[in-house]
Image (cartoon, coloured by chain):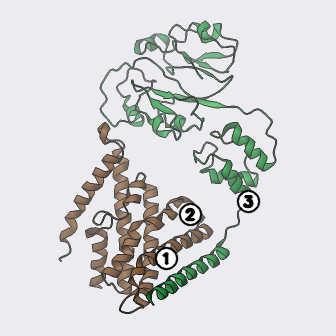
Chain colours: A brown, B green
Amino acid sequence: MRELVTIFISAVLVNNFVLYYFLGICPFLGVSSRLDSALGIGMATTFVMTMTALVTWPLNYYVLSADTGMGLPFLEYVIFIIVIASLVQFVEMFLRRFFHNLYRALGIYLPLITTNCAILGMALFMVLREYGYIETVVFGFSAGAGFTMVIVIMAGIREDIKYAPVPEIFKGAPITLITAGLLALAFMGFSGIIAP
Amino acid sequence: MTVIQSIIVFGSIGLVAGIILVIAYSKLKVEEDPKVEKILESLPGLNCGSCGCASCHEYAVLLAKGEAGIDLCRPGGPEVRKKLAFIMNMDSSEECAVFKAVIRCRTQERKCTADYTGPRTCAAAHLTGGGMACKYGCLGYGDCVEACPFGAISLDKDNFPVINFSLCTACGLCVRSCPRNLITLERVIDGRVVYVGCSNRQPGKETRKVCVSGCIACRICEKKAPEGTFQVKDNLSGVIRQDPGIKIDEIKCPTKCIYEMS
């Protein structure tokens, strides 16, 4: 239990995917201009991450792993990508059929998740750190939760930046990147929570 | 050996994923009117909302059901109307009115009574008057520029918004964005729009004090222009009917606040 809480706090605050590993920067900068769409892509990413964790761990353990499976670790990347892509497709069909409003609200962001490197990163970290099944699922969920939290914070800040007197040359992308950097620095303050 | 193994593993996982997706697709398929797809293709796809629907898709669904007319898409104009009429087997022969947005404040200089240092948006500046002498004039922080999805509005060097006539689609988003309600949609006749570049409803004397080119409601335009084109109401002149017979040079507006856009 203690282990799981540590994984959760570590993935959300201390080793946040966006601000510590710089994964998933593309949606972080691209979709963070409005609060509601930021929340939408955050939720969708969390969902797909958790599902990916559920599916890729058995695949890795029983098929790919060198010790317990058939010894094909070099296939990790391609197989994880296939799993993520089919999951996103499946989620898209499912939402379209049963939750049409949510589907419309997420719009283009749903297929974009396929190319979000944070999800592939999560699956690869899972192998690297030799997590168990439950640990992996918690890790997937908390990585998604951390991503959602950061993208929502970023969207809130960017909505306020619109009304701030930003110098002409910093308008647009530069001020966004500076903000992201400051946010990452601020999150470094959490690094003391978990003892090494 | 490893090569064959990996080909088999990779192939079978791909196959299983494919089969699951095919089964899922056949079970979860959403039946949609084939017309919706076609309509959606001919719509501009800007989701501007001027038709009254939340998105182009929603409009397409309503149209396919026959619950909406074919003439609601403003950005598309006559061209899209023709295409929609073809898809829906409807008559498109009747004349389609074209509108453009005009900004009813075009003074050469903005007289200020105070410095405004608050948030740089019209909505915020309007609350305090933005330090401007004219209570009706353009604040110049570009809320309409932000609102325009087509990039048709830009601020000139004096921070006055200028509408690009050919890019404007009369979607009406800028109309809603202006806190002083300076923007209106006017009908295009003979490829041009005539409008009064002032919204000041104070009496002429007061208007003169705050602006060199505001409408002072002298009623010259009512007399010189063809009957029923201009009307002065609440100390402010306005074009109530666009007419090819309106000639701006002949009206001789004393403050030169009648403009045309083409």
Q: Which residue occupies 46% across, 57% down?
A: A37
Q: Which residue occupies 63% across, 16% down?
A: B231
Q: Mark 3 points at which residue?
A: B34
Tell me the chain of label 1.
Answer: A
Looking at the rendered structure, the secondary structure element under dot 3 is helix
* Closer to viewer: mark 3 or mark 1: 1
Looking at the rendered structure, the secondary structure element under dot 2 is helix
Is residue A165 visible in the rendered image? The answer is no
* Closer to viewer: mark 2 or mark 3: 3
Tell which of A122 and B29 is nearer to you. A122
Q: Can you say which quadrant of the picture contains the N terminus of chain A?
A: bottom left
Tell which of B58 and B165 is nearer to you. B165
Q: Distance between the residues labelled 1 and 2?
A: 21 Å
> Horizontal placement of A2 versus B110: left or right?
left
Label 1 neighbour load within 10 Å: few <14, some 14-19, many 20+: many
Q: Which residue occupies 25% across, 54% down?
A: A182
Q: Distance between the residues labelled 3 and 1?
A: 31 Å
Q: Which mark is residue A83?
A: 1
Q: Distance between the residues labelled 2 and 3?
A: 20 Å
Q: Name the residue under label 2.
A: A103
Q: How many labels does the image show?
A: 3
Label 2 neighbour load within 10 Å: few <14, some 14-19, many 20+: some
Query: Which tag, 1 or 2, sits closer to the chain's start?
Result: 1
